[in-house]
Amino acid sequence: MKTGTRTRRPIGSVLQVSHVSPGKGAMIRVSAVLLAVFATFSPAMAAEPARVIEVTGEGRVAVVPDMATVVVGVTTEARQAAEAMTRNASAAARVVKALKGAGVEARELQTSALGLTPLWSREDQRQPRIVGYRATNMLRVKVRALDRLGALLDAVTQAGGNEIRGISLGLSDPAAAEEKARKRAVRDAIERADTLAAAAGVKRGPILSIVEGGGGAPRPMLEMATARAAAQPVAAGEVEVTATVHLTVAIEK
């Protein structure tokens, strides 16, 4: 019988050696298992922080307003609800007629409030009771010619209007001013990014994103609780149209 050594390789990295030796038909098997460990190490690459500069730019444009929105109306009181409403409707009709006579078109008139509320008496600490009613009719009016605003308010009071609230000056077409404000906002944002890059000793790269923020035209308000008999001069002054943009730029490596 031949004595020999056989080697075989199973699947994987296991090497098994069997030694066969004679003797009384007995087989002595000596197995040696060699394990080879192959560790493949691939360290997780930490995400590199984004190299960007984020800034917000603002643009402002001052413009002379060319229109106004004003709320005018009539408040009447009477002992009976029906009487208060009737008086109010009559006075409101005169106000509307006066507005149209002053050049205001029907499409520029809109009812903003219409109501009837009870008037309560609390004299001598007795149980409150209704002693009358207050009727209110308010109109929102667009005035396209500011030079006529004072005369228009005078016409309202002469017709029986006794409420003038919230005169708001604005622009009939703000598109051009808004576009100019946006351009200024972008330029301002780029200048801010350049300033920050220079201060940090880096170079500004390309623009990655531009997001427009809020904006609009702040409107100066002139509040008048009750109308006066004389025509009121109105100084138009200026309104300011603003725009903001949020800019993200890369930092060049």
Image (tube, rainbow, N blue to C red):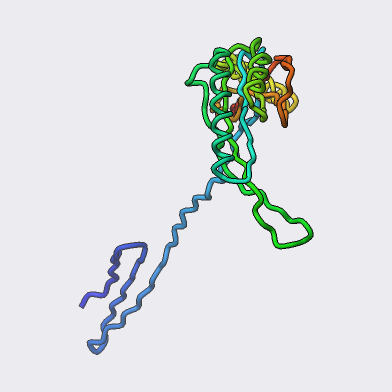
Identified at 63% across, 16% down, the residue is 152
Residue 150 picture location, percent across and down:
68, 15
Q: Nearer the viewer, residue 18 or 76?
A: 76
Residue 211 picture location, percent across and down:
55, 29
Quadrant of the rendered image containing residue 58? top right
Residue 201 vertical position relative to residue 235 in the rendered view, above or below: below
Q: Is residue 130 left or right of residue 111?
A: right
Q: Is residue 62 visible?
A: no
Identified at 52% across, 49% down, the residue is 44
Residue 192 vertical position relative to residue 12 in the rendered view, above or below: above
Residue 105 picture location, percent across and down:
50, 17
Where does the N terminus fall, quadrant-wise?
A: bottom left
Q: Nearer the viewer, residue 83 or 149?
A: 83
Q: Nearer the viewer, residue 229 or 111?
A: 229
Identified at 64% across, 40% down, the residue is 77
Quadrant of the rendered image containing residue 70? top right
Quadrant of the rendered image containing residue 148? top right
Identified at 55% across, 12% down, the residue is 103
Residue 75 vertical position relative to residue 37 in the rendered view, above or below: above
